Image (cartoon, rainbow, N blue to C red):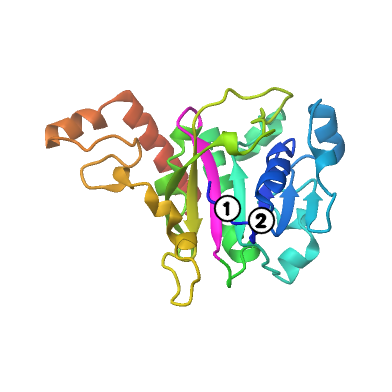
């Protein structure tokens, strides 16, 4: 994960705050605002070990509880009313919608699958990053750290999230090395349990797809291009990350597989949801 010490950073949905605390201690950003979806009391009740006490120890730190990235009413008023865009980088680590227990919630959502709910969450995250969070004069970077296991690998985030969005683009990806974040524990979103450590991949979006002429460091715009976009090449299946196919018949056989048919259903439902 590419981070510069002079950046102003916003972290989204940092369950027990261990990622934000490690980020602050090991990378020393200019400013850090950490957000948590839960209230402070819920966080403390849910996680026996957390990093609340390691933050808010400096005037350049801030922790916001009850923060829903999709709902501006839960943000500080100046962010949504005055559109005070003040961050260079926004990070969302291993995002996942909670396992809602209220049956009324799913009744209201109709036939929308959990797969689509997660995609809609991340799409709204990108929209709000560009519209409210990112400083137009900064590097304007959005990170989503995911991994190649279910359910993450079924979201097709590299290709689907910014579909029909004109103001932000997917740039590429880089490996996430958790060893550079001592003390960071990937948590289960709903209970006090660590998630099995698997290789993370940080995908990058930005409203800026090319460095400006007066940019001091071009790599802050283009760092994500270090990883090849192999699954966007010709003769590959973008939604399954399969290929390249050696023949038309090979591609047809892939499209008949159970995995592809399921992924196509997810794509169709997501496309319908964003119309």
**Residue 50 falls left or right of residue 219:** right
Which residue is more in the foreground, 30 or 109?
A: 30
Q: Is residue 257 magenta?
A: no
Left/right of residue 24 with respect to residue 112 in the rendered view: right
Residue depicted at x 79% and y 33%: 50
Give the CA distance from mark 2 to mark 1.
9 Å
The residue to which callout 1 is attached is: 3
Of the numbered discs 2 and 1, the one sitting upstream in the chain is 1
Kindly identify the residue that appears in the image at 74 percent across and 39 percent down. Answer: 17
Start and end of the magenta stretch? 139-151
**SS class, disc 2:** strand
Q: Quadrant of residue 118?
A: top right
Relative height, residue 141 to residue 46 (above, below): below
Expressed as whole percent of the image width and height from the top left, the position of residue 101 reads 71, 27
Nearer to the camera, 176 or 265: 176
Circle 1 SS class: loop
Front: mark 2 or 1: 1
Q: Nearer the viewer, residue 268 or 54?
A: 54
Q: Which residue carries the number 2 mark? A: 9
Looking at the image, residue 158 lies above or below residue 214: above
Give the quadrant of residue 245.
top left
Q: Is residue 140 magenta?
A: yes
Q: Position of residue 66 (x, y in %)?
A: 79, 46
For the residues bearing labels 2 and 1, Cβ distance under 8 angstroms: yes
């Amino acid at each position: 994960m590419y981070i510069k010490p002079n950046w102003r950073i916003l972290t989204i949905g940092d369950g027990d705050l261990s990622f934000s605390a490690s980020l602050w201690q090991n990378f020393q950003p200019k400013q850090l605002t950490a957000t948590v979806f839960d209230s402070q009391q819920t966080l403390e009740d849910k996680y026996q070990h957390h990093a609340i006490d390691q933050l808010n120890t400096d005037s350049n730190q801030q922790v916001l509880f009850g923060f829903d990235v999709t709902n501006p009413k839960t943000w500080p008023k100046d962010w949504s009313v005055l559109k005070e865009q003040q961050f260079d980088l926004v990070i969302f680590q291993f995002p996942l919608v909670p396992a809602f227990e209220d049956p009324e919630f799913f009744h209201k959502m109709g036939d929308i699958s959990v797969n689509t709910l997660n995609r809609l969450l991340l799409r709204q995250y990108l929209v709000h990053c560009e519209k409210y969070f990112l400083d137009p004069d900064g590097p304007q970077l959005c990170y989503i750290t995911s991994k190649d296991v279910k359910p993450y690998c079924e979201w097709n985030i590299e290709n689907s999230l910014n579909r029909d969005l004109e103001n932000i683009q997917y740039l590429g990806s880089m490996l996430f090395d958790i060893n550079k974040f001592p003390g960071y524990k990937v948590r289960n979103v709903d209970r006090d349990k660590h998630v099995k450590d698997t290789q993370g991949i940080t995908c990058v979006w930005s409203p800026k797809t090319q460095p400006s002429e007066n940019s001091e460091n071009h790599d802050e715009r283009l760092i994500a291009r270090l990883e090849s976009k192999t699954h966007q090449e010709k003769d590959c299946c973008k939604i399954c990350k399969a290929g390249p196919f050696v023949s038309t018949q090979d591609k047809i056989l892939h499209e008949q597989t159970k995995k592809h048919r399921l992924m196509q259903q997810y794509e169709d439902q997501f496309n319908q949801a964003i119309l």
